[in-house]
Image (cartoon, helix red, strand yellow):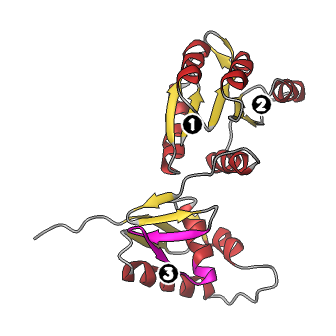
Amino acid sequence: MRILLVEDNNELASRLARRIRSAGFVVDHLDTVESAALAIAGCPYAVALLDRRLPDGDGLRLIPHIREKQPGIRILMLTALDAVDDRIEGLDAGADDYLTKPFNLDEMMARIRASLRRPGGDRAPPVVLGSLSFDFDARAVTVSERPVVLLRRELKLLEALLRRAGRIVPREALVDAVYGFEDDVQPHALTTLASRLRARLQELDAGVELHAVRGVGYMIAKDKPKKSM
């Protein structure tokens, strides 16, 4: 599944592209209205992320062209123009959503996933890490293409970690993701659950490692190959 990123700030574009690729998408980065119009005419995209202030004009100019060529595409505007009238202008021009710079990369990914869940949108691709694959839409886990059954809370913890793979997820955020308001959460419940999930992933030879960061939280990452003696 391909995403078109139209952004002329190369440093920002690099960060956005890395984050999007880590979620399993293919990203094409362009930095002008003209080059983006050519890309839209020649390649199908699930989502377009458009900056407004581009070297050769306003990214809004692209929207009619995009809608003509690819009616089902989802369009998210990325812009430093934060006035209410600017946001209204973007949405009225045909954008599906609007993110004002600076924005959180996790929020950006959540908005991309939400846009793809709407009727007519493509499904988000599974997140793949090591030999592990997690389809968030189907809530299905496979290891080396073999289906895996996890307990309900193990599945919730794995999902919360994979949504921020390679980064430390605070304990509080994991507790909120795994347990409901009505649950009586014991002090070491998350530690016990994380240990159980780690053992299960090792048993499955999933090619990932669950790291504990003392007093902070947990991180899941691809397992490093062991050095030969």
Answer yes or no: is residue 21 visible: yes
Please tell me the numbered disc located at residue 197: 3
Please state the horizontal and vertical placement of residue 16, each as a whole percent of the image.
Answer: 55, 38
**Residue under label 1:** 3
Distance between mark 2 and mark 3 Cα atoms: 41 Å
* In the image, residue 168 lies in the stretch drawn in magenta: no
Span highlighted in magenta in the image = 139-154
Looking at the image, residue 20 sits to the left or right of residue 130; the answer is: right
Quadrant location of residue 224?
A: bottom left
Looking at the image, residue 50 sits to the left or right of residue 181; the answer is: left
Q: Amino acid at mark 3?
A: Leu
Please state the horizontal and vertical placement of residue 118, each as a whole percent of the image.
Answer: 76, 48
Q: Amino acid at mark 2?
A: Ala
In this rendered view, identify the residue nearer to me: 41 or 208: 41
Distance between mark 2 and mark 1 Cα atoms: 15 Å
Which mark is first along the chain, 1 or 3? 1
Callout 1: SS: strand
Q: Residues within 10 Å of mark 2 (few under 14, many from 20)?
A: many
Distance between mark 3 and mark 1 Cα atoms: 33 Å
Residue drawn at (60%, 51%) of the image: 124
Closer to the camera: disc 2 or disc 3? 2
Please tell me the numbered disc located at residue 95: 2
Please state the horizontal and vertical placement of residue 47, each as a whole percent of the image.
Answer: 64, 37
Looking at the image, residue 136 sits to the left or right of residue 182; the answer is: left
Closer to the camera: disc 3 or disc 1? 1
Callout 2: SS: loop
12 versus 153 height, above or below? above
Residue located farthest toward the top when viewing the structure as drawn: 56
